[in-house]
Amino acid sequence: MTQTAAGASGELLQPLGPELIEQYRRDGYVLLPPDFLPRDVLDVTAAVMPEVLAEDSPARILERDGSTVRSVYGLHRSRPEISALTRLPALLGAVRQLLGDDVYVHQSKVNIKAPFAGDQWEWHQDYVYWLQGDGIHRPDLVNVAVFLDEVTEFNGPLTFVPGSHAEGLLAGADVDGMPLGYEDAPAWVATLTADEKFQVRPSVIEDLARTNGLVSPKGPAGSILLFHPNILHSSAANISPFRRAMLLFVYNSVSNSPQGIAEPRPDFLADPETVALQPL
């Protein structure tokens, strides 16, 4: 994989200026342009994605129709090409700037919203799943989403309540049972479907949205979206004829490693290897 001039091999960058760091702290997210990463990142991902989506494994989650791929998890563990992307100096440098610590990848996945068939993601916060399911006791994580396709207002962009991460964990409910269409799946699948297991109350969402507004970051393929694990977010169904795919890496501080879980989730959902990543 090629490196940009600013990302020579082995160098730990500090690519985020003070304004971007302040935006992340204030709003809970920041959107970076496609030239933030090497030009061939999309080519590398496109080359492995057909095989990733075709492989029938527990790490592949389907939509309710039982045939459309929704997500595939654990790619940084199963695909060397994807593992290499997690160690790009610009990505590691940005995440370390935000967390102030060495990091590892706790979880990775590709989320696919197929044309006309990609389902919603209900309003939720990510961190509660890692707290309750994986024993991660501080929200010292950063989500990194690489747009594999252009993201528009039509193909199901992420929608944020900016600044909602500052509220901490929001009032919600733990929904019992399995979602419709997944009744025979393992229990951990309930956290990965269109029906969120940990749901935020509509009144809480309304109050925050009326105060803070709503925003849907959009951009061309190759754009990079960094967002806080406690930011309140959702995404609508893909009503367009165009795919919306995102590659997501969840970076966690090495000092925030999972603890105290008697029955850990599968490795492709919660990586047990918490060794600090080194840049390429």
Image (cartoon, grey):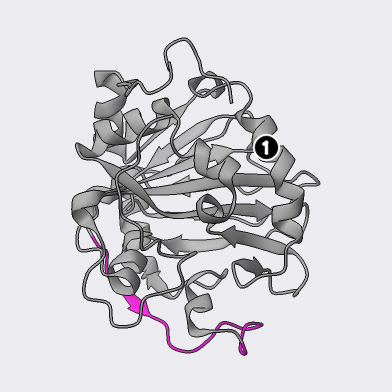
Q: Main secondary structure of the magenta part?
A: loop
- For image coordinates 35% across by 42% down, the residue present is 162
Q: Is residue 119 visible?
A: no
Q: Position of residue 145 (x, y in %)?
A: 50, 42
Q: Residues within 10 Å of mark 1 (few under 14, many from 20)?
A: many
Q: Quadrant of the C terminus?
A: top left
The residue identified by callout 1 is 149
Q: Position of residue 220 (x, y in %)?
A: 63, 28
Residue stretch rendered in magenta on the structure? 169-184
Q: Is residue 162 visible?
A: yes
Q: Quadrant of the N terminus?
A: top right
- For image coordinates 68% across by 43% down, the residue present is 154
Q: In the rendered image of this protein, does residue 181 appear above or below residue 212?
A: below
**Position of residue 120 in the picture relative to residue 137 (left or right):** right
- For image coordinates 59% across by 41% down, the residue present is 81
Q: Position of residue 266 (x, y in %)?
A: 46, 72
**Tag 1, which secondary structure?**
loop
The residue nearer to you, when weighing 216 against 51, is: 51
- Quarter where residue 28 is shown: top left
The residue nearer to you, when weighing 175 against 108, is: 108
Q: Three-letter amino acid code at disc 1?
A: Asp
**Position of residue 54 in the picture relative to residue 171 (left or right):** right
- For image coordinates 61% across by 60% down, the residue present is 72
Q: Position of residue 98 (x, y in %)?
A: 26, 35
